[in-house]
Image (cartoon, helix red, strand yellow):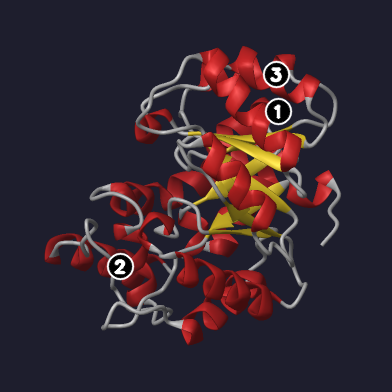
Amino acid sequence: MNISLQTLRGTGVAVVTPFKKDFSIDFNSIKNLVNFLIKNGVGYIVVQGTTGEASTLNEQEKVLSRIAYVKANNNRVPLVIGIGSNDTRSLTEYIVNADLEGFCAILSVAPFYSRPTQNGMYQHFSAISSVSPLPIILYNVPLRTGCNLEPSTSIKLAKNHKNIIGIKEASGDLNQMSNLISNRPKDFLIISGDDESAYQSVLKGADGVISVAAGCIPKQFSNIINMALKNDIDGSRKHFDEIHRLLILLFKEGNPTGLKAALSINKLCENILRLPLIPASNKLYVDIENYFSNNI
């Protein structure tokens, strides 16, 4: 699927990988989730990211899951695929050999655990850029990776590699976000990866969000981001305040623990996660259930 950068503005959703009670992939729920998200106005869907528990999927499952999402989507919205590793050589080989039909871009997380220098990360993403058949969106999430892709490194990558088209900036640091927005080259997408600060980032000039919460409240979250894109400060803040309680609950025991509880409550998939992640505690589940009973 060819893509214009404009179609990756607004609200993207980091989608879960639904599992059955026997922990196998629930392909029927994939179809239901995709229909639910598109019907409620999301701009694009990100498959096999952090929220998709990609680290727990074997290679066959990754392939079958990709095929299922492409089929369920049926070219209705852009699909982005998450592919990342802290082993640059195996990652480049994987990207060269993977069948990525139906996807418009790769979201690639900064190398985790190894804690490389800025130059190491620059060389890592340059290597990916040199072989990728699809445009690349950098993914900076320091709390998970243990390293921070600094704005100067991201901007250097953007300027030197035309197929690096944007960054999902999930540090939650609004100063870092402002630095990126101020110094980015033309047509380089700045996408928030932090639901808590997403609308504020958009008001500062970011292009949108790849959201966890939009996985269960797609219409509400999309509306907030659309208001922010129109520079409606009061409207976006008001509607954000209305969902803020849910955001706190969704992330209270980690992601996608809260999200899968919410999806289960709304009959969109089973509340099943693969170890080392576990389902929400009874108290959190009831709190999320009460939120939906009283607010949606």
Q: Which residue lies furthest to the left in this view?
A: 282
- Determine which residue is flagged by label 2: 261
Q: Where is residue 250 in the image (x, y as percent from the top left)?
A: 33, 54
Q: What element carries label 2?
A: helix
Frontmost residue, 280 versus 86: 86
Residue 266 appears in the figure: yes
Q: Is mark 1 on a helix, strand or loop?
A: loop
The residue depicted at 35 percent of the width and 66 percent of the height is 260
- Determine which residue is flagged by label 3: 155
Q: Give the amino acid type for the residue marked by disc 3 in the picture.
A: Ile
Residue 269 in which image quadrant = bottom left
Q: Is residue 228 above or below residue 211?
A: above
Q: Give the amino acid type for the residue marked by disc 1 in the picture.
A: Gly
| Mark sitting earlier along the chain (3/1) | 3
Q: Give the amino acid type for the residue marked by disc 2 in the picture.
A: Ala
- Determine which residue is flagged by label 1: 205
